[in-house]
Amino acid sequence: MKLTKSTVEGARLPEKGQRFVWDDELRGFGIRLTPTTRTYIVQARVNGTTRRVSLGRHGTITLQQARKKAVKELSKMVEGIDPILEKKRLKAESVPLRQVVEDYLGDRKGLKDSSRADILKHLNKAFEDWADKPIAKITRDMVLQRFRKRSELGKTQANLAFRNLRAWFNYAMGAYRAENEPIITHNPVKVLSETRSWHRIQARSGKVPLDKIGDAWAKIQQLRTAPEQTTISRTLADLTAFLMLTGCRIGEAGPLTWDRLNLDEGWWFLPDPKNREPITRPLPKVLVGILKERPRTGDYVFPGRSSGWVQSVRGVTDAISKAIGAEITAHDLRRTFRAVAGEVGVEFWKTKLLMGHKMSGDITLSHYTEKSDLRYLAGDLERIATWITTRKTPTADNVVPFPVKGGGR
């Protein structure tokens, strides 16, 4: 029959389930009847698949309005536009960047808290004004212009921020799909590769020169024992000594608590290192002595100024830099540890374990080496620590001039 207001209102509702009444005049237009509702619909095949779209409930829209909407929807479907995919596409394209990042973090269950914080930092600093913008509205030109602007503040941070943005787009391309087809089909960050805009960043290789180890250690000891020092300055110096003598990361040593430290047996436990493998590491004797002198005023071995733990030793590394005549960071102490290990002949695989690196390359070492309890490497660590702490600072008394050819001085 041709649908009219009277036929729609007079159609018998089913006691359960649903039934359909189709219009003879406009093919594919009809009304779906349920026990409580009358809903206008349109149905047709699109690309070999039957699609049905709800147009609105009778009473909310009129029959004439529904018929006009049906004509528009049928025209789109004749042109091959899938209404279901189109609806999902529009929804996905309206998702703001902030929601994409939240979904991204939600799906990455094993991500460390520090990594999550870094990701959110980039969102809120580099892309603060994009956070509530639909991701589909971020264009190649916008990416290129923002990258150039952020590069003026720092090339390394610009690279990091836009690598994160690239990862968020790649996630959106995989996560937001309809009928196994991606809704977001292009990653605008590709423009940085296509225009060769990524910055070449020189790998950091800073460390305390071996002939300056004595100066560096002497400066740490001076800061530890200075009579005018405050509690926090002593803590910073002690933490720096810990970093230098163990080769660990500041993010591993800073949050160390007393219950994960055994000074009687000389070891410490790290439950969640960067490689996600809990590990027990040995402590050198000189460091045990330093730690025994520390006051136990709370849970943390290296407590912060007001709360939490120390997260930077910048003041101490600046003092070391001045003493040795070269700029040094906390991470450079890790590279220093590795250099000293090589100097005293500690095998490279042992050094990697002591520093918390993953074992790779050699299958035998990787699969059959004890990696969770490194107390068997205490002797190797002791050799490294002894070399660091016994270097002499050059003075006029211990500098021996090399003889000149011919016997001259």
Image (spheres, grey):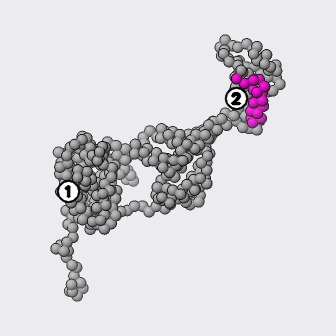
Distance Cα–Cα, label 2 vs label 1: 79 Å
Q: Position of residue 316 (x, y in %)?
A: 28, 58
Q: Residues within 10 Å of mark 1 (few under 14, many from 20)?
A: few
Q: Amino acid at mark 2?
A: Val
Left or right: residue 103 versus residue 335 is: right
Q: Is residue 387 visible?
A: no
Q: Does 37 sit above or below residue 176?
A: above
Residue 2, numbered label: none
- The secondary structure type at the circle numbered 2 is strand
Circle 1 residue: 228
Left or right: residue 345 versus residue 13 is: left
- The secondary structure type at the circle numbered 1 is loop
Majority secondary structure of magenta residues = helix
Q: Position of residue 356 (x, y in %)?
A: 33, 50
Q: Nearer the viewer, residue 100 or 322?
A: 322
Residue 53, numbered label: 2
Q: Is residue 61 visible?
A: yes
Q: Position of residue 154 (x, y in %)?
A: 47, 59
Range covered by the magenta-colored residues: 60-78
Left or right: residue 177 versus residue 62 is: left
